[in-house]
Image (cartoon, helix red, strand yellow):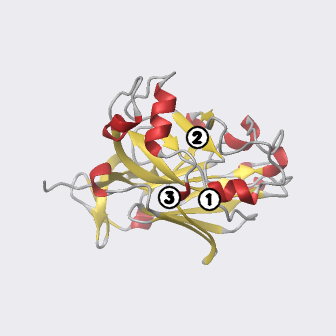
Amino acid sequence: MNRATKTARVAYAGALHAATPDPLGVRLSDGRVVAEEAVVWLPPFEVGTIIALGLNYADHLKELSKELTVTTQDPPLVFLKGPGSLLGHRGQTRRPHDATYMHYECELAVVIGQPAKHVKAAQAMAHVAGYTVCNDYAIRDYLENWYRPNLRVKNRDGGTVLGPWLVDAQDIPDPHQLTLKTYVNGRLTQQGSTANMVNNIPALIEYLSSFMTLLPGDVILTGTPEGVVNVNVGDEVVTEIEGIGRLVNTLVGDDLFGR
């Protein structure tokens, strides 16, 4: 089938556009080709419910083992986010002046394409439309404890970066064999594999759909591997997932927000 399988949503010259990759930048829905830096990048699809997973990588669990009582045998640690938490590619995320430890989280984001209710794992992947990259920041200072994220940590305005592309599920034969990497100012600081998920995508869809209906546009953020480090104002953070994309974000200070 000859059709674009990587799509984005951008703002340009006062209008919203669907966009696809082009060797010279991005091709807008009206046919114009513009530089990547010339557009404002939005999350690449109309986002519904944002469902996030904590501690869903075995190596990250091991990394935090001294602070945790949760194990790989526990049910998935799930929490929700509001729409104000979302930010697009090349956006700016605020780092509060009182934060001493704020870190990125490179995550595979799974986008639902078909309604799912009481779906078994064996049929779960048929409900997936595609994938994008997420960088889900956390401020460890604000945690109530080390294994139950609270709103100040995980529902911050502009703290959940999505994009740049939505990649069709048909183009990712095995989403459980992808390399995830994070670079801070060009230096590789995190590297892992989706093979190390504690609960894989079919298991998550089965679990979630057992008590809530998943709808098109809902997105599941599947957790991050080990290797999270503190980042500071002025840092450029690039989260990258094999076959899906390279998501760029910059940290800025309170002064830009009048605080």
Q: Is residue 58 visible?
A: yes
Q: Quadrant of residue 175?
A: bottom left
Which is more foreground, mark 1 or mark 3?
3
Which is more foreground, mark 2 or mark 3?
3
Of the numbered discs 2 and 3, the one sitting upstream in the chain is 2
Q: Which mark is residue 259?
A: none
* Image coords of residue 217 (percent x, y): 40, 35
Residue in the picture at 54% in, 44% down: 199
Q: Rate crowding at label 3 as few (under 14), some (14 to 19) or many (20 or more) other CA atoms within 10 Å.
A: some
Separation of residues labelled 1 and 3 (CA atoms): 10 Å
Which of the two residues, 109 or 75, is positioned nearer the viewer here?
75
Is residue 2 rendered to the left or right of residue 69?
left
Of the numbered discs 2 and 1, the one sitting upstream in the chain is 2
Residue in the picture at 68% in, 57% down: 60
Type of amino acid under label 2: Ala
* Image coords of residue 78 (percent x, y): 62, 35
Is residue 236 rendered to the left or right of residue 114?
right
Q: Which mark is residue 52?
A: 2
Which of the two residues, 125 or 95, is positioned nearer the viewer here?
125
Which of the two residues, 38 or 201, is positioned nearer the viewer here?
201
Which is more foreground, mark 2 or mark 1?
1
For mark 1, what is the residue? 225
Residue in the picture at 50% in, 38% down: 204
Q: Is residue 48 visible?
A: no
Separation of residues labelled 2 and 3 (CA atoms): 18 Å
For mark 3, what is the residue? 195
Q: Quadrant of residue 6?
A: bottom left
